[in-house]
Image: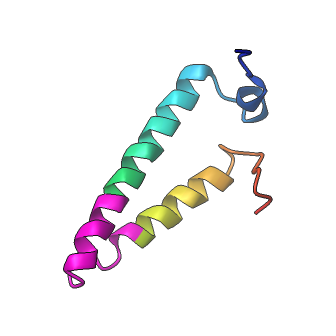
Amino acid sequence: MKIEISHLRDNDVTYFQHMKRAVGWSARLGAAGAALLIHSFFPFIFTHYASSSIFKINKEMVGASCKKNPSGV
C-alpha cells in the first residue's frame, strides 16, 4: 500500500492536524446522525440540531481547511 500525502500538502496540514479535524468532524456528524434518528420518532425534539451541525461542518470543510473539494462544489 502506497501512503499518499499529497492530500495533506494540498490542505497545508500535518498528519496529526488532519487526524484531529477528521475525528472531530466524525464525532459531530455521528451526534447529528443520532439526533436525526431521535428526531424521526419524536419530531418535536432536535428540530434544528442536525441541519445546523451539518451546515457548520460543511462551512469548515470548504473553508481554508479543505482547499480541494473532489465533488467540485
Does 67 appear above or below 42?
Answer: above
Q: Quadrant of the N terminus?
A: top right
Q: Is 66 covered by the magenta stretch?
A: no
Q: Which residues are magenta?
A: 33-50
Find residue 16 and report its horizontal and vertical position in percent: 53, 22
Q: How is the image coloured?
A: rainbow
17 sits left or right of 5 in the view: left
What residue is shown at x 30% (from left), y 80% (from top)?
47
**Along the line of sight, which residue is nearer the eye, 53 or 3?**
3
What residue is shown at x 75% (from left), y 45% (from top)?
67
**Along the line of sight, which residue is nearer the eye, 60 or 32?**
32
Find residue 53 and report its horizontal and vertical position in percent: 42, 63
Quarter of the image for residue 8 reads top right
Does 54 appear above or below 69?
Answer: below
Q: Is 37 covered by the magenta stretch?
A: yes
Secondary structure mostly seen in magenta is helix
What residue is shown at x 38% (from left), y 68% (from top)?
50
Does 45 appear above or below 60?
Answer: below
Which residue in the rendered view is the most extreme toward the front?
1
What residue is shown at x 19% (from left), y 80% (from top)?
42
Find residue 52 and report its horizontal and vertical position in percent: 43, 70
Which residue in the rendered view is the most extreme toward the bottom?
44
13 sits left or right of 44 in the view: right
Quarter of the image for residue 44 reads bottom left
17 sits left or right of 31 in the view: right
Find residue 23 and report its horizontal and vertical position in percent: 44, 36
